[in-house]
Amino acid sequence: MSRYLILILLNAPLIIAALLGNLVNFKLGKLSFRKYIGQTIIWIAILLGLVFAGPIYEFLFTNDLTQTEPLSLFDVVQITGIIVVLFMSNRSRIKLQNLEKRVQDLHQELSIRLSRDEKFIKK
């Protein structure tokens, strides 16, 4: 089995989960359309980079544009780790944005209630 195929098989579920997560967050209104498109483009670019990593390496090697060794098993694990970190940081960022929005909404509601109470007390 090719190391490039292992790389794709290890990372495709993470990328698909990220794409589905983006879609769900967009449908729930937790993500704006612009951010949804941007994140989707990033994840599709990562997937395309993984899919075409083998052919790109072959092209570079046959045209003497690189003298590096082919992908090692350590490289597969390292790239998978990087994609896991990207996946987790993206999820954490979205959760943090949602929490910040919720705190802002709660602060606004509290300010409105306090201003109503002050108007009622002054009368």
Image (cartoon, rainbow, N blue to C red):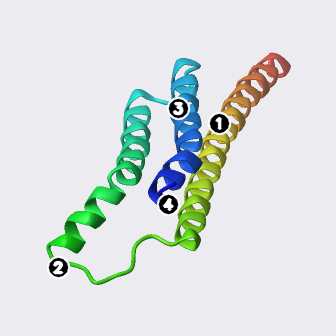
Q: Position of residue 58 (x, y in %)?
A: 26, 65
Which residue is more in the foreground, 62 or 13?
A: 62
Instruction: Indicate which label's residue lies in the foreground, 1 or 2.
Output: 2
Q: Position of residue 83 (x, y in %)?
A: 55, 56
The correct choice, above or below, for 24 with respect to 67 in the image is: above
The quarter holding residue 91 reads top right
Cβ atoms at labels 3 and 4 below 8 Å apart: no
The correct choice, above or below, for 20 with respect to 66 in the image is: above
* Pointer 4 residue: 3
Q: Secondary structure at mark 2?
A: loop
Instruction: Indicate which label's residue lies in the foreground, 2 or 3.
Output: 2
Q: Amino acid at mark 4?
A: Arg
Instruction: Indicate which label's residue lies in the foreground, 1 or 3.
Output: 3
Which residue is more in the foreground, 98 or 82?
A: 82
* Pointer 1 residue: 98
Q: Amino acid at mark 2?
A: Asp
Tell me the number on the disc at residue 22.
3
User: How far apart are the alpha carbons under marks 3 and 4?
Assistant: 29 Å
Q: Earlier in the sequence, mark 4 or mark 1?
A: 4
On screen, residue 33 versus residue 105, left or right, reads: left
Q: Secondary structure at mark 1?
A: helix
